[in-house]
Image: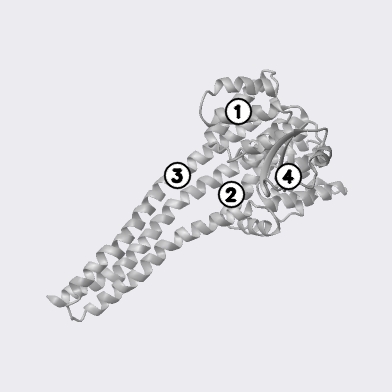
Amino acid sequence: MKYRCVVVSLDGSSAGSRQELVREAADKDALVRELTSPERYILSIEPLEASQDKGRRRGQLRLSGRELLELTESLSLLFNSGLTVKEALGIAEMIFEKGRLTRAVGELNYFIERGKTLAEAVEAASMNVPPIFSGMVKIGEKIGGLDTVFPRLVSYLRTRKELRDKTINALFYPALVFVIAVLGSLGIVFFLMPRMEEVFAGMQTAGSGDAFAGMGLLQTFLPAAVLLLPLLIILTLVLFFYRSRGGEKAMGVDRIFLRMPVLGRILTTAECLTLTFGLETLLGSGIPMEQALTESREILGSPALRGELTGIREKVVRGTELSDAFRGSDLFPAKMAGWLLVGERTGKVGEVFGQLRRFFQGEYEKYVSRFMNMIEPVLIVGIGIFLLILVMVFIVPMFSLYGSLI
């Protein structure tokens, strides 16, 4: 096997010079014995293939939702035609002639040819796919049913893309109004008010003090109000990023998000949709419940719910009924325990997860639609409050000032 070695030469002619060598040896220990000498210090030794892989993995391969869906649809069709992973990727390379999809398929093919599984190839290629994609690919390979998993994955990704498109379309108008309001506020603070102060600077009337006080209040209030919302958005994004890092603190942050009135319900419903989707697929493929719970943990994006599912699995292993284990959770909806109890009584737990998946999909779409519908009236109320403040602290004193001049 070939190895890439980094050494430092300690001889008199090139003291301290760094060298990269390629050597072939039976194993790493044999190579260490070969290279060890008083004139040479070994910095690192790694297989040449791993070194090449590391060079290929520089930079994350970012696919858009549309591109990921297109790739999944193509692979689903090829797997359903009875092709192997290597054959499917070979044909996919001919289908996608340019762009990021060409690079993605090429990277996957590269690692498949070197003996990796498709799930390992997805990870090695550093593709920014959602956890459910890599998790379901891993599940499909374990049950030997990529042709079964990929059509369901296509359905999930298509629904996810449609919801994202709806969200973007619904947010476009409120975002445009917000940007115009921010720009208008900045124009009032930095352009209109300084000129108004110059106009009224020489007017010593009864209303001038109120006008100047109103302008001073607006000059303090508007920049603070304009900066507050972007800071809140940035803080939320930072917390979401921190939440994705894992660990005990991330679980604490995640619990805060899951308990928020509107956002928490949307996040919980989305994760329950993912979980029931995975469990339905696994149990339908004959995987035991304990193993299905273990595999499904990997497709969840919420650290708190992953930890909760681990606790549920431990209870099931100790003999607790699945419905009772879910009932003891304070994060999963109580409806899951009720439906699972029905499944246990009828002996159709796998079918119940299919019904739960359809239920949570409908609930998720409903909550997202409600949230989007709330944004516009909230924005209108906010702008109305702003205009009321503008009238009370600036416009009314200004009219009083004009009245005193007449």
Q: Which residue is mark 2?
A: 266
Q: Secondary structure at mark 4?
A: strand
The quarter of the picture where residue 169 lies is top left
Q: Residue furthest right?
A: 319
Of the residues shown, which amino acid type is indicated by label 4? Ser
Of marks 2 and 1, the one in the foreground: 1
Pick whichever of labels 3 and 4 is earlier in the sequence.
4
Identify whether 112 is placed above or below 335: above
Q: Which residue is mark 4?
A: 44
Q: Are marks 2 and 1 in contact (CB under 8 Å)?
A: no
Whole-number angstrom distance, CA of label 2 to CA of label 1: 33 Å
Pick whichever of labels 4 and 1 is earlier in the sequence.
4
Whole-number angstrom distance, CA of label 3 to CA of label 2: 16 Å
Q: Which numbered circle lies on residue 170?
A: 3
Of the residues shown, which amino acid type is indicated by label 3? Ala
Q: Residues within 10 Å of mark 4 (few under 14, many from 20)?
A: few
The quarter of the picture where residue 206 lies is bottom left
Whole-number angstrom distance, CA of label 3 to CA of label 4: 54 Å
Q: Which numbered circle lies on residue 105?
A: 1
Identify the residue at horizontal 40%, vertical 59% (top origin): 381
| Image location of residue 278, percent across then percent down | 71, 38
Q: Secondary structure at mark 3?
A: helix
